[in-house]
Amino acid sequence: MIANSEIMADLNAVGGIIARAESDLLKGAILDLSPLENHIETLCSRIENLPPGEGHPLQAKLLALADAFGRLGRSIEAKMNEAKSEIGEVSGRQQAASAYANSSESGK
């Protein structure tokens, strides 16, 4: 059961990283998800090495993390779509301003 408590601690650490990432994303901060890779690799290795049947108590936490990853992914995608939209609006305004400037110059 020591292995399960260590795994649960790692699962909680990953959950904390995801929660901080969601919070940072809402604040408009740049996300650094690089610490997740090592945690996930370690978790997968530990879970794979558990004796049969010992992983069952971890199932609920693993499902909760999967949901959290899904939420974070959707939040990141939404922010990316917002950024694309804003870039498109700026580009459209720049094109309009350029067209106006060109028409003003040709009318002189």
Image: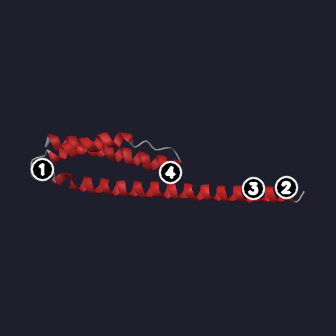
* Relative to 74, residue 11 above or below: above
Q: Are marks 2 and 3 in contact (CB under 8 Å)?
A: no
Secondary structure beneath dot 1 equals loop
Give the labeled residue for mark 3: 98
Q: Residue at x 79, y 59 (%)?
A: 100
Task: Tell me how far mark 4 sits from mark 3, CA to CA.
Answer: 34 Å
Q: Amino acid at mark 3?
A: Ser
Q: Which mark is residue 26?
A: 4
Give the labeled residue for mark 2: 105
Task: Tell me how far mark 3 sits from mark 1, CA to CA.
Answer: 66 Å
Secondary structure beneath dot 2 equals helix
Q: Which mark is residue 54?
A: 1
Q: Amino acid at mark 4?
A: Leu
Taking 60 as reference, is 92 left or right?
Answer: right
Which numbered disc, 4 or 3, marks the residue that appears first in the sequence?
4
Callout in the foreground (2, 4): 2
Callout in the foreground (2, 1): 2
Residue 94's x, y, as percent? 70, 55
Which numbered disc, 1 or 4, marks the residue that appears first in the sequence?
4
Mark 2 residue crowding within 10 angstroms, few (<14) / some (14–19) / many (20+): few
